[in-house]
Image (cartoon, coloured by chain):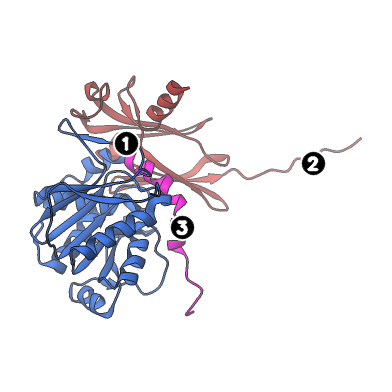
Chain colours: A red, B blue
């Protein structure tokens, strides 16, 4: 139980095994779009990789320099973080076509079009 | 004694001070970033802390020394009350009462609460505007003279809101400074705007060059505190700050 709690905390902010940090994100919806924002300090546009996958939006971004929190914590102080990584679950199904992304002042904003519901009527024999 | 009673412990006695600054984790962590930077830049001395059975069982360790998470700093005629963890909404009224009672006992002339106000178009804003809420005409004039725009209509939620109520009750000049900010990401740029207003108000010259130079590192380091603060903000009805009040339409 206690270890589950610690695991959850760790998953929220960093991944020591892959030396990656988990970014802060916000997800919102309009009638026809899902909007994802990701806070990416110490990242440049050319180093961001975005992929739409089954589980959501996958983001990977390498840092401009490796970061070590030398005086903080116990095991974390020994880890040199090299990137941000997160799979962001989306609240509605989306399509890749027409997706837009901008990166400004270290914040990435991605707009994804929602998948239109197609009605399939089933005839009754 | 109620478990919610909050007391202020002075480890180094403070006889008098003119200004009291308060900054706790809130919108964009603006108040915390601004006040921590002022404390560091001005090398303010740690002079005390807040104590209560209702505070979470947490201490913070700096340079190997255990410390309370809610502490007092002092330099010249300024005292700063800063928190390194979000304040539980249940204990906000007790913290506000104890700070204002203490401020009254020290004959403080002005209490300034530092915070942020979330704006959706923050990415488009180069220099965040600072708005102010003042407890009296005298305080509003101070703000106008310092280039702070008066916050005319709206809701304000959090410790600073209750500090203002206590200031009004106790007739202590109080103001809330709110810099335009990101809601859910640490915002050192907004903190720099707050510091500029603070400089104008009390005549200090805290240089924000280093704060802006370290902006990305600060955002990186404060992710966990921001995430923790987001949970608390939901409980203090932060969403209200985006609503129009029904009176005086």
Chain ID at mark 1: B
Q: Which label is found at residue B138?
A: none
Circle 3/circle 2 CB separation < 8 Å: no
Where's residue A102, x and y in %? 36, 47
Magenta stretch: includes residue B149:
no
User: Mark 1, mark 3: which one is toward the viewer?
Assistant: 1
Q: Nearer the viewer, residue B175 or B13?
A: B13
From the image, give the main secondary structure of the stretch colored magenta.
Answer: helix
Label 1 to label 3, Cα distance in Å? 28 Å
Where's residue A66, x and y in %? 21, 29
For residue A6, say whether it is visible. yes
Chain ID at mark 2: A
Q: Which residue is mark 1?
A: B58
Q: Nearer the viewer, residue B219 or B171?
A: B171
Where's residue A47, x and y in %? 29, 34
Is disc 2 on the same chain as disc 3? no
Q: Which residue is mark 2?
A: A121
Q: How many numbered discs, if any?
A: 3
Q: Which residues are magenta?
A: B224-249
Q: Which label is found at residue B239?
A: 3
Under circle 2, the secondary element is loop
Question: Is A35 on the left or on the right of B102, as rendered?
Answer: right
Q: Residue at x 47, y 80 (%)?
A: B248
């Amino acid at each position: 139980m206690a270890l589950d709690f610690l695991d959850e905390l760790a998953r929220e902010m960093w991944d020591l095994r892959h030396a990656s940090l988990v970014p802060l994100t916000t997800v919102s919806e309009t009638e026809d779009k899902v909007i994802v924002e990701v806070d990416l300090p110490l990242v440049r546009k050319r180093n961001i990789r975005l992929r739409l996958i089954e589980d959501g939006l996958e983001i990977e971004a390498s840092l401009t320099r490796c970061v070590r929190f030398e005086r903080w914590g116990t095991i974390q102080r020994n880890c040199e973080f090299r990137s941000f990584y997160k799979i962001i679950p989306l609240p509605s199904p989306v399509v890749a076509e027409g997706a837009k992304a901008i990166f400004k002042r270290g914040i990435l904003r991605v707009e994804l079009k929602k998948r239109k519901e197609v009605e399939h009527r089933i005839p009754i024999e | 004694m109620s478990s919610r009673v909050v007391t202020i412990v002075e480890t180094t006695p403070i006889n008098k001070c003119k200004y009291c600054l308060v900054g706790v984790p809130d919108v964009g962590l603006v108040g915390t970033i601004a006040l921590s930077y002022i404390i560091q830049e001005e090398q303010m001395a740690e002079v005390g802390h807040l104590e209560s059975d209702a505070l979470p069982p947490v201490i913070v360790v700096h340079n190997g020394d255990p410390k309370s998470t809610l502490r007092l700093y002092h330099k010249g005629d300024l005292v700063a009350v800063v928190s390194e963890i979000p304040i539980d909404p249940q204990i906000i009224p007790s913290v506000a009462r104890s700070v204002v009672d203490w401020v009254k006992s020290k004959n403080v002339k002005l209490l300034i609460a530092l915070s942020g106000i979330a704006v959706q178009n923050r990415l488009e804003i180069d220099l965040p505007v600072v708005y102010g809420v003042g407890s009296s005409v005298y305080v509003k004039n101070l703000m106008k003279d310092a280039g702070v725009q008066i916050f005319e209509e709206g809701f304000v939620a959090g410790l600073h809101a209750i500090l203002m109520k206590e200031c009004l009750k106790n007739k202590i000049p109080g103001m809330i400074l709110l810099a335009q900010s990101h809601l859910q990401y640490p915002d050192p740029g907004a903190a720099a705007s707050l510091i500029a207003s603070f400089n104008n108000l009390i005549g200090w010259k805290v240089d924000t060059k280093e704060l802006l130079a370290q902006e990305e590192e600060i955002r990186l380091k404060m992710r966990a505190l921001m995430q923790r603060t987001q949970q608390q903000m939901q409980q203090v009805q932060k969403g209200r700050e985006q609503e129009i009040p029904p009176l005086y339409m």
